[in-house]
Image (cartoon, coloured by chain):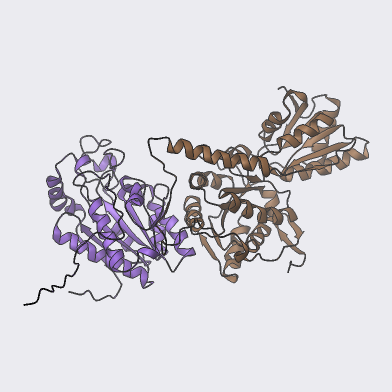
Amino acid sequence: MSTDIEYKKIFGWPESLKHNPTHYCPGCGHSIAHRLVAECLDEMGLREKTIGVPPVGCSVLAYNYFNFDMVEAPHGRALAVATGIKRVQPDKFVLTYQGDGDLAAIGTAETIHAANRGERISAIFINNAIYGMTGGQMAPTTLLGQNATTAPGGRDARLHGQPIDISRMLAVSNGVVFIERCALTSVKQIRKAKKAIKKSFQCQLDDLGFSLVELLSPCPTNWKVSPKDSWNWVNEEMVKTYPLGVIKDTTGYEDKK
Amino acid sequence: MPSEKMLMNGSQTVGEAAVRAGCRYYFGYPITPQNELPEYLSARMPEVGGTFIQGESEVASINMVLGASVSGARTMTSSSSPGISLKQEGISYMAGMELPAVIINMMRGGPGLGNIAPSAADYFQATRGGGHGDYRTPVLAPGGGQELVDLTFEAFDLADKYRNPVMILGDGLMGQIMEPVVFPDFIDLKDLPEKDWALRGCKGREARAIFSMILGQKGELYRHNLDLQKKYDRMTAEEQRWEIKYAEDAELIVVAYGSAARIAESAIEELKAEGINAGLFRPITLWPFPLPALRELSKKVPKLAVFELCLGQMVEDVILSVGERSEIYFHGVPGGIIPTPAQVAEFLRSTVKGDGKVGRRIEV
């Protein structure tokens, strides 16, 4: 009987994440999203050639957690900054990590035009339907009827406008090759999200065009519910306005089952 | 090799000079009166392996510049007054993040949309930072023609030397006037100091971040501001540029920059024929303003005639330079009206006589 057991590492701390505790609230989706991005970069061998652009918002300090080069952008301008980086360094891997206020309100113009130019950039879009960092104000993505500190009594379409579905808006552009919407609130969806992120990264490596992965993400603090209820709210309410799934895919990739 | 003598308008001149100074990344949004610059570079950049992008806005363009700069490239944008207002957010961030870039402002009449005629009403905005926060950007004011070439080279060098945005402040007249210019040879980018701070991926080193947000509770932002100020103090000590002409035997000194200085020079020649000797003090760096040089000159010639293509902005720096020691007279023309040399000569005659018919005495 042999005592030589071969151990194979099947799980560990991703190299693309620093060993820093995050400032994110309990139940927040950012930590999961960070982890997925880091795992994908590691598994695709991209960490050392990556330059990331975080947003202004809760993840403005993402450079304290991600272990690759990062540069701050003014609020909403991540995809313009990323454009400048990618045009100078087309051989590098450039990603933005943006919240809904950043990507779909103040930065809408930069988002649409970078996508429409088909910039070879991967955008990770965290949609939690609220302004987190500033304390729960209405976001462009806030659902109808959802409470926010600047929409007391809930979002009213006549008064505040409809929740914006920027992913579907972007999908009409020929510069965009891949958009998928996933959620960070079930193991099954988290695994799907990782697959989508990898596919988005592959689009950039293959020089296909712009891609984006939208992640529906819980914000229990500003939704004023427990972490558990926040997951349920994503799975039961948020998906009605933002249905999950592939929104656009012209990559021609055959997905491995 | 330097170029042949070429006839080009001011905007194209800046474009060609930028390319030869090693700029390969231009991002901008159309606005009159400087469109000849992006148009020129849209054709020129591909010829030299560079990139031209027409951004969706001035805001996007300056942030593309930010991204190119953080990648270690020589990069620039250009615009005219209303567009420069939109770029201020990005310029403030770049100042905070210590990123070099060159920004061209071919000024037009304001406020608001104003008009598309030449003006010089953005002096305050250019020399006082322009955006939010406690920062400065060097401001170079060419007189046009060959100096547009020389100062474009200088702007890129200063930007890299101090890791800071640098502005070239021209105007619509300078941008459109055609003049003979000679371009120096292309610089070799390999001859420039390595930008070891640039973000090019963390292969072989620790990951790095460049940012302007400094939250810490132990005075980190306080110290960052003090460090920036030390840099601005160094610029103030080392980078003042100016020109003095016709000052021998002068009974008054005209203080003017850019296109206003060229109009003033013609007026000075007109007066010479009448036996009136007027000198010219022309600041070339508007920030840092050549305070000590003007102060020294004013000790010899205490009568100063300040002429601007606006209603009085640089004159405040003149007052800071000479205080109560001099007699300061001011004449300004706003709204994109370009006065003739004869009109400026009237101001200078009036200043000599002190009759107050054209311009006014500034009481300090």
Q: Image check: A12 left or right of B280? A: left
| Residue at the outermost left position | A1
Asked whether the viewer can see residue B120, the reply is no
Q: Colour of chain B?
A: brown
Q: Colour of chain A?
A: purple
Closer-to-camera residue (B149/B176)? B149
Residue B351, by quadrant, is top right
x, y (%) of residue A251? 30, 73
Residue B251, by quadrant, is top right
Q: Image check: A96 left or right of B319? A: left
Residue drawn at x 30%, y 56% is: A17
**Up-down: is A220 above or below A120?**
above
x, y (%) of residue B6? 75, 64
Q: Quadrant of the N terminus of chain B?
A: bottom right
x, y (%) of residue B336? 67, 42
Residue drawn at x 63%, y 46% is: B107
